[in-house]
Image (spheres, rainbow, N blue to C red):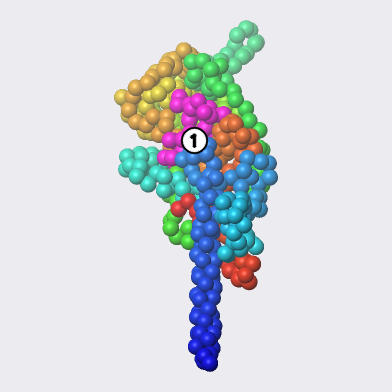
Amino acid sequence: MRKGYMTVFLTLSLTLILSLVFTVIEGARISAIRMKFECVADIGMNSVLAEYHRELLEQYDLLFVDMSYGGGHADIGNTEAHLKNYMQKNLRPEGGALNALGVRDFLAMSTDKVQIGQYSIASDEGGAVLKRQVTDYMADYPLGAVLEKIHLGTSEIGQYGLETRDVEAERGRYEAEIDEIGLPVEEVEEGVFAEVPLNNPADAANATRSSGVLNLVLENPSSVSAVKINEKDYLSHRARIQGSGMCAEAAVISGKPDELIFQVYLFEKCGYYGEEMEKSLLKYQIEYILAGKGVDWKNLEYVAKRLLRWREVANVIYILSDGAKVAEAKAAAGALAAVLMCPALLEPVAYTILFAWAYVESLQDVKTLLSGGRVPIIKTAADWKTGINSLTNVRGSLSADSGGRGLNYKEYLQIMLYLQSREQRTYRAMDIMEMDIRRTPGNARFRMDACFDTYQADLCISSRFGYAYEMTRTYGFY
């Protein structure tokens, strides 16, 4: 008779061994689920970022994902659906050799929840999200010379009051003084008296003020672009989609935007008068950022008028300090018949001549700048171009000049941008981006406030074997 204790021992041993094996297998399943969850989350979230907007990168070197995906409905729910789809396909791929063989899925995972809680839109924080990317892109740009010129120019403009001094009111006071004194009268016929005509050369110059500055300073005003847009279609004029704030992790890594770098970036990517870009809808893009008007002509006119105002203040400051020109103006005033008959008119008439002369010189300056020349903020006698005789023939006395010293048109534009409101400058720059991107195929409804660069997702998966896990991850272009 054989004893059976070996069978009992083996049975008990196998029970323990199988328990250990199954425990190890289940532990491996749990570890595999967790590891696959990490991998699939990484793949899915990076796949979302891989859908960055190609045209925005091509034209402006910016990495953003358009959550409308070329459609008309911009909503973060679209991105959540894309992320869930990417995760699900990597968790349980359809088809394949194993499925064909009837092999069971060892993990049997599925995506239960995908929720994007935080995301940073390009226009958030007054456009700071956009400018952080620009700062990174332009990190190696040499700013020394640009910074020096802008700071020097803005300090001179502030020092001399080019933005604040009202020379028109000053001129008006001298004209009012002439009116108060009144013109002398003379007998033209027996018993008939008439005012002696003043024949002030300043009047001829001032009469051109209503002609429009571009008509005076451009050789061919009809060549100016007349492209027109509807401003209300663009970001700075509409209610904007808001993100949920910059993700804390991304904000720390990206740092603060640099306004000067952003300004230099605009001149690299946008055109302006004399340096237009073929890709652009509006040809004078920097002028649009400054003026915000819907017609190219009006934007250029705004800048030209502002330049004229700056130059007129600067030229009044100089001409009133130039003893020779003051004496010349007084001599011209003294030669007028009315002044000869009424010496009290000498002083105010001379000053109206000086102000008109400064105005004509300012027109010459704007013409020089638009012709590619240079004009210093404050002139010397060597820089002065016009003579007193130009007051009676303003149009004929102006000439294109591409030389000179001082600042050129681009550098004056840089100073204007530097003085502009940060938020206004940024939003109008995004208008320009929308205009240009919408000209490309499939992007007719593109909007910058539908573009995000960083997002935080709350993810949850479960397994048919009774396990569920959650995680929160932040991904972005930083």
The count of marks equals: 1
Q: Which residue occupies 56% across, 33% down?
A: 436
Q: Which residues are magenta?
A: 263-288
For the question of whether residue 69 can be seen, the reply is: yes
Magenta stretch contains residue 280: yes
Magenta stretch contains residue 102: no
Secondary element at image label 1: helix
**In the visual, does 141 lie left or right of 45?**
left
Q: Position of residue 96 (x, y in %)?
A: 58, 50
Q: Which residue occupies 40% across, 34% down?
A: 411
Q: Which residue is mark 1?
A: 59
Q: Which residue occupies 49% across, 20% down?
A: 217
Q: Position of residue 23 (x, y in %)?
A: 53, 77
Outermost residue toward the top in this view: 189
Image height of 420 relative to 373, above or below: below
Residue nearest the viewer, comparing 461 with 465: 465
Residue nearest the viewer, comparing 211 with 354: 211
Q: Which residue occupies 54% across, 66% down?
A: 33
For the question of whether residue 242 can be seen, the reply is: no
Instruction: Name which residue type carries label 1.
Output: Gln
Outermost residue toward the right in this view: 73
Q: Residues within 10 Å of mark 1 (few under 14, many from 20)?
A: few
Q: Position of residue 206 (x, y in %)?
A: 53, 22
Image height of 185 relative to 126, above or below: above
**In the visual, does 95 lie left or right of 159?**
right
Q: Position of residue 143 (x, y in %)?
A: 34, 43
